[in-house]
Image: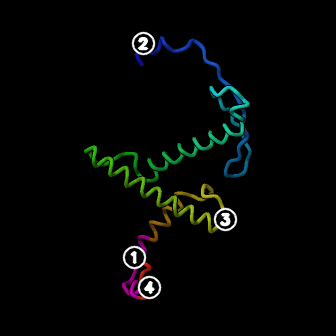
């Protein structure tokens, strides 16, 4: 930020502090304090802001998952074109895993966020490995299952 931009900033800012109650995975209730510039409580209700905060939290968790569990913290390609392709491949794989989780959650009648991303990823990798080393007769007896 330039000095001129800094000096153009207001000397004061009005914020609103609100407390929201959230349940974690263990069903334990916690109180969170959210500070926002959305000051009008009639227009921006606490419950709505709490929901938006949760969505933001999930977005941060998803980015962390991409970086750490999908091994995207260090991109291996050098050119901008290949970096775009590498990021696209990671996002595709991530969305495929999340799609499997959504289907499993539907079948199990639970929320998709209640399932473990890493557990699903390990299951997919185990299935992939077992398929790579499956005897040829399995594919012959089950036409169309592996395509």
106 shown above or below 27: below
Q: Which residue is under mark 2?
A: 3
Q: Quadrant of the C terminus?
A: bottom left
Along the polypeptide, which appears first: circle 3 or circle 4? 3
Along the polypeptide, which appears first: circle 1 or circle 3? 3
Distance, label 3 to label 4, CA atoms, is 29 Å
Q: Which residue is under mark 3?
A: 109
Question: What secondary structure is marked by label 4?
Answer: loop
Q: Which residues fall within the magenta stretch?
A: 128-140
Q: Position of residue 133 (x, y in %)?
A: 38, 77
Q: Which residue is under mark 4?
A: 142
Query: Mark 1 and 2 residues: CB-CB less than 8 Å, in contact?
Result: no
Q: Position of residue 51 (x, y in %)?
A: 66, 42
Along the polypeptide, which appears first: circle 2 or circle 3? 2
Q: Nearer the viewer, residue 71 or 111?
A: 111
Name the residue located 57 percent from the left edge and 41 percent from the top edge: 56
Name the residue located 58 percent from the left edge and 66 percent from the top edge: 104
Distance, label 2 to label 3, CA atoms, is 55 Å
Q: Nearer the viewer, residue 58 or 68?
A: 58
């Amino acid at each position: 930020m330039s000095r001129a931009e800094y000096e153009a900033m207001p000397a004061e800012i009005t914020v609103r502090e609100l407390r929201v109650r959230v349940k974690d995975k263990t069903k334990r209730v916690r109180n969170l304090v959210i500070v926002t510039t959305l000051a009008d409580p009639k227009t921006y209700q606490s419950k709505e802001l709490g929901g938006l905060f949760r969505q933001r939290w999930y977005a941060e968790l998803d980015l962390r998952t991409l970086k750490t569990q999908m091994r995207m913290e260090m991109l291996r390609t050098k050119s901008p074109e290949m970096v775009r392709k590498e990021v696209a491949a990671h996002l595709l794989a991530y969305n495929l895993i999340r799609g499997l989780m959504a289907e499993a959650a539907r079948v199990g009648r639970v929320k998709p966020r209640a399932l473990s991303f890493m557990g699903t990823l390990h299951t997919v990798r185990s299935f992939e490995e077992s398929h790579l080393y499956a005897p040829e007769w399995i594919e012959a007896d089950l036409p169309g299952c592996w395509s």
